[in-house]
């Protein structure tokens, strides 16, 4: 059977026809040669940029990471560390050292990460921490004497380290909280909240250093940063034992660097994060979401805004972007964000404290915005049809660095002039591969839906597209549902186009980057009118004469999997469908998902309180109307959309109906299969999806899915 699968995979790759342009067609296995830049950090003087380079392991079963550096004035990047699991580089305030994380073991998971120090004058990196439960999120104090970090370490861990022959603790879980596991993380341990620790930086290389906890207790602290005088640490926290009974929220707190009482600084009606201090150190900017508005008890989607606040206890934050109806601190979705080593960017201030800079997403693109810290006036710093995925700024250097992706480029680093927004490209990370490929830009279109609402979409056409010829089409639906496609790289779309399909990927109502009302309009109505938006897009392409109405396929993952299941239960126009990590029955999902739906954001109550609504909005309710051949893609470790709540139900029901159906299960994979799963699994996933469409949309003779 293994030989059959291998032959099948090789046949799929070999079947790619020669490109009509200057290069060859992209293949599914090209992902093995991809490289990703992650977490760029510019030096304090603005002269150099260090970043994490992510590569696929030789065996294609994981990823490796190492630190690289590139001059901000231009020049060839060079490797700083050997890896294979180095990440999170952070410059010391004087730029003389780098702190970073290094993990050991298979895929960096056997031994937890520790903080290492690397002198920029030369020499080997040396360990700074040695905690049994590891360290993460290093942050230098402004005076350069200390590094704060996160750890789930508890005092008894030292005892276990000293006594390795001690009897191991019980492996039986006593679960008392409704949220007890998390996709990608596994089972949660409420006895190990993540706390803030501090370690002194030795004066001499290799000198011993002892870490100590700054915070303690039952709650996790995150997003921490130092005061300008290095005496206080600020952090965000949700200090409620069972937060799922309330709408999402967190607050800004402070604690003395030496430890002591925690003081609440500021809060809004919702969660906050991505905090940064102004140059004077008396105000903070942060990204937050307001839970309530327009008479709605709790929104399904709350658009993020930029707030500023005083650092006096009990301060009331000011919403600077209340009148700016787009997503602050957000971007657009694709399948090629760095699969490892990513870190969220935080707003940065101008040297005079007048402006705050932050990325924002508008109509499928993401750029840096300059926001007046007093008036809230928003004006673009960078412009373009691209995705500013992450960024970092040098204090007072009037320059920043941004990681930017486009529909034909996975992502490269650009120097950003703070005054003009001018972009200077610093890296060409994937040029050795991409210079060989025939990649075309997608065409952006707008069309009207059933009620006159305008919908934005992109169309990826096959290389060498011939006007007048009608192509088979794949409708590709994004998840979320509060997310967005846009001007970023998607290997999946290029691969499908290279196989001869026109790929339509729209942003139906409920998508982000179009304002609060557009995002929240599907509350208590999902799926529903968003399906009509999708069908209007299919009709638009048919009317343009680009696609064959008799050769249509549909696919999507997560929320897109929900809409795929829904679509084939409400129309017979698709010849084949591929539903990925989906939901079939909302009632089962309510009980099984890793997060709770206890608050009335998606449904107004529990399943037994809203039986009719749960049933009406569940794709499995319409199983009797489905006659479309369906493939189901499932990650066996998916805690977000467990297979039992989605694919397994669809599979068993369609088998009962004798409709062609197959379930492809990926061992060990989570909900992130398509974005950060094992490279070999990501490739096989793509190959199976296209093969299913080749069989049932194109009519090719493929026997891989015959009943064995």
Image (cartoon, rainbow, N blue to C red):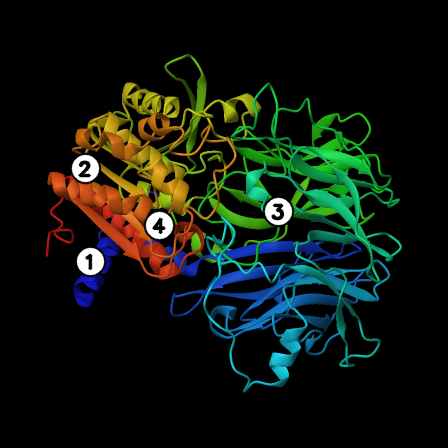
Front disc: 3 or 4: 3
**Residue drawn at point x = 20 percent, y = 66 percent:** 2
Cα separation, mark 2 vs mark 4, equals: 21 Å
Q: Which residue is mark 1?
A: 8
Q: Determine which quarter of the picture holds residue 149.
A: bottom right
Vertical relation: 183 (above or below) 170? above
> Element at badge 4?
loop
Image mark count: 4
Give the spatial CA distance, label 2 vs label 1.
18 Å
> CB of mark 2 within 8 Å of CB of mark 3?
no
Q: Secondary structure at mark 1?
A: helix
Upstream in sequence: badge 2 or badge 1: 1
Q: Secondary structure at mark 3?
A: strand
Which of 654 and 560 lies nearest the eye of the viewer?
654
Query: In this figure, which residue is indicated by the disc labeled 4?
Result: 26
Q: Left or right of 330: which side holds 206?
A: right
Give the farthest residue toward the top.
452
């Amino acid at each position: 059977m293994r030989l059959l699968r291998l032959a099948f995979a090789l046949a799929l790759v070999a079947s790619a026809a020669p490109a009509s342009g200057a290069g060859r067609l992209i293949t599914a296995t090209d992902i093995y040669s991809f490289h990703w830049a992650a977490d760029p950090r510019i030096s304090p003087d603005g002269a150099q940029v260090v970043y994490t380079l992510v590569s696929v392991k030789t065996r294609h079963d994981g990823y490796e990471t190492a630190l690289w550096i590139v001059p901000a004035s231009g020049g060839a990047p060079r490797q700083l560390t050997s890896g294979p699991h180095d990440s999170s580089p952070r410059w010391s305030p004087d730029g003389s050292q780098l702190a970073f994380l290094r993990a050991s073991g298979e895929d960096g998971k056997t031994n937890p990460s520790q903080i290492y120090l690397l002198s920029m004058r030369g020499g080997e990196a040396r360990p700074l921490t040695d905690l049994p439960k590891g360290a993460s999120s290093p942050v230098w104090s402004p005076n350069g004497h200390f590094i704060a970090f996160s750890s789930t370490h508890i005092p008894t861990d030292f005892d276990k380290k000293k006594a390795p022959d001690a009897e191991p603790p019980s492996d039986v879980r006593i679960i008392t909280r409704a949220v007890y596991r998390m996709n990608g993380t596994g089972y949660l341990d409420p006895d190990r909240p993540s706390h803030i620790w501090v370690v002194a930086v030795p004066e001499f290389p290799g000198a011993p250093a002892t870490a100590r906890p700054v915070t303690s207790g039952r709650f996790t602290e995150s997003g921490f940063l130092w005061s300008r005088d290095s005496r206080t640490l600020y952090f965000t926290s949700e200090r409620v034992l069972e937060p799922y009974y309330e709408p999402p929220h967190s607050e800004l707190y402070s604690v003395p660097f030496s430890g002591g009482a925690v003081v609440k600084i500021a809060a809004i009606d919702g969660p906050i994060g991505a905090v940064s201090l102004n140059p004077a150190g008396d105000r903070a900017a942060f990204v937050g979401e307001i839970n309530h508005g327009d008479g709605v008890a709790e929104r399904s989607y709350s658009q993020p805004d930029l707030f500023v606040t005083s650092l006096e206890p009990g301060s009331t934050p000011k919403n600077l972007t209340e009148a700016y109806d787009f997503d602050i601190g957000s971007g657009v979705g694709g399948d090629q964000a760095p699969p490892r080593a990513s870190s969220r960017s935080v707003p940065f201030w101008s040297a005079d404290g007048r402006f705050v800079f932050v990325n924002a997403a508008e109509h499928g693109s993401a750029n840096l915005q300059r926001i007046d810290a007093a008036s809230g006036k928003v004006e673009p710093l960078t412009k373009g049809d691209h995705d500013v995925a992450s960024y970092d700024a040098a204090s007072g250097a009037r320059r920043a660095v941004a990681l930017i992706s486009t529909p034909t480029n996975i992502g490269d680093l650009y120097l950003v002039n703070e005054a003009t927004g001018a972009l200077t490209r610093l890296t060409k990370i994937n040029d050795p591969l991409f210079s060989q490929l025939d990649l075309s830009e997608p065409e952006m279109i707008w069309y009207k839906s059933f009620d006159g609402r305008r919908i934005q979409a992109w169309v990826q056409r096959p290389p060498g597209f011939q006007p007048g010829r009608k192509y088979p089409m794949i409708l590709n639906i994004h998840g979320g549902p509060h997310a967005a496609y846009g001007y970023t790289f998607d290997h999946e779309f290029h691969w499908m186009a290279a196989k001869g399909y026109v790929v339509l990927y729209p942003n139906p109502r409920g998508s982000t980057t179009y304002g609060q009302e557009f995002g929240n309009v599907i509350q208590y109505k999902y799926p529903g009118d968003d399906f009509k938006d999708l069908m209007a897009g299919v009709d638009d392409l048919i009317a343009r004469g680009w696609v064959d109405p008799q050769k249509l396929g549909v696919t999507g993952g997560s929320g897109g999997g929900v809409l795929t299941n829904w679509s084939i239960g409400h129309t017979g126009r698709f010849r084949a469908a591929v539903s990925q990590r989906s939901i079939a029955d909302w009632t089962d999902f309510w009980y099984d998902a890793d997060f709770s739906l206890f608050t009335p954001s998606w449904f107004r109550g529990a399943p037994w309180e809203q039986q009719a609504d749960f049933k009406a909005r569940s794709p499995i309710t319409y199983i009797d109307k489905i006659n479309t051949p369906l493939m189901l893609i499932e990650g066996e470790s998916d805690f977000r959309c467990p297979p039992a709540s989605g694919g397994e139900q669809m599979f068993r029901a369609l088998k009962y109906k004798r409709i062609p159906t197959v379930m492809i299960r990926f061992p060990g994979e989570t909900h992130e299969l398509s974005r950060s799963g094992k490279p070999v699994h990501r490739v096989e996933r793509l190959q199976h999806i296209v093969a299913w469409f080749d069989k049932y949309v194109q009519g090719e003779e493929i026997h891989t899915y015959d009943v064995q």
